[in-house]
Image (cartoon, helix red, strand yellow):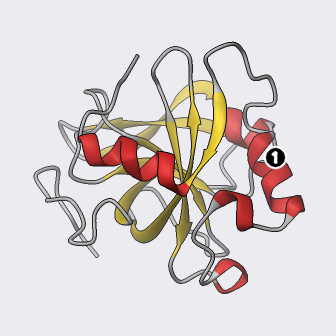
């Protein structure tokens, strides 16, 4: 599916979303999106997700801005191997609320057989939850991992950054 920067939110927002893949699971270098030409290029830094063993993809929620402007970041659980620029339909299932306001929405690829039908981060198998929490193993004051209800409430505001 191709969706441009002006694409609307998913029709089942905030339960479902489209995520533009920015960082595939198998890329050790961080990729940066360049909106002027729609490309994804290494920025010379190591990918935090790759370094911390996140077995999924990373991107942003379509319809609410795009990098480098304000946007909703998304961690995507998927058995697929999406490439940068691919758009995935996902279920919104959780949230890492970051003290700096750069929150991460946890999503599940709707085509993902291992997690098909799971709608909340805390309903996933413990090993999967541990892998996800490994992205941000240290939780400081004002931060935390939350389930689908909190993530959907944040998305419903339509405002990517919050105090």
**Residue in view at x 61 percent, y 16 percent:** 142
Residue found 63% across the figure and 23% down from its top? 143
Q: Residue furthest left?
A: 6
* Nearer the observer, 67 or 45: 67
Q: Find residue 58 and report its horizontal and vertical position in percent.
A: 54, 49
98 to the left or right of 61: right
Left or right: 92, with 133 as reference point: left
The number of callouts visible is: 1
Q: Relative to residue 41, is residue 108 depicted above or below?
A: below
Furthest-right residue in this view: 127
Q: Kindly identify the residue that appears in the image at 79 percent across and 54 percent down.
A: 129
| Visible residue check, residue 46 | no
Residue 13 visible here = yes
Q: Residues within 10 Å of mark 1 (few under 14, many from 20)?
A: some
- The correct choice, above or below, for 47 with respect to 111 in the image is above
Above-or-below relation of 136 to 57: above
Residue 53, horizontal then vertical, whole percent: 81, 46
Task: Specify the quadrant that holds the N terminus.
Answer: bottom left
Relative placement, left or right, of 73 versus 4 is: right
**In the figure, residue 65 lies in which quadrant?**
top left
When asked about the image quadrant of residue 108, the answer is bottom right
**Picture quadrant where residue 30 is located:** top right
Q: Secondary structure at mark 1?
A: loop
In depth, the one of 136 and 153 nearer the eye is 153
* Screen quadrant of the C terminus: top left
Residue 158, image x and y in percent? 23, 41
Residue to which mark 1 is pinned = 53
């Amino acid at each position: 599916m191709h969706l441009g920067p002006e694409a609307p939110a998913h029709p089942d927002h905030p339960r479902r979303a489209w995520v533009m893949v920015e960082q595939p699971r198998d890329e050790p270098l961080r990729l940066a999106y360049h909106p002027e030409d729609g490309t994804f290029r290494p920025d010379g830094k190591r990918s935090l997700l790759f370094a911390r063993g996140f077995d999924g993809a990373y991107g942003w929620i379509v319809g609410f801005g795009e990098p480098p402007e304000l946007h909703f970041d998304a961690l995507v659980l998927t058995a697929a191997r999406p490439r940068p620029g691919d758009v995935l339909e996902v279920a919104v299932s959780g949230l890492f609320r970051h003290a700096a306001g750069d929150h991460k929405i946890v999503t599940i690829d709707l085509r993902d057989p291992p997690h098909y039908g799971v709608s909340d981060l805390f309903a996933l198998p413990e090993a999967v939850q541990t892998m996800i929490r490994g992205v941000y193993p240290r939780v400081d004051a004002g931060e935390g991992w939350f389930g689908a209800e909190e993530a959907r409430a944040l998305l419903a505001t339509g405002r990517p950054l919050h105090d």
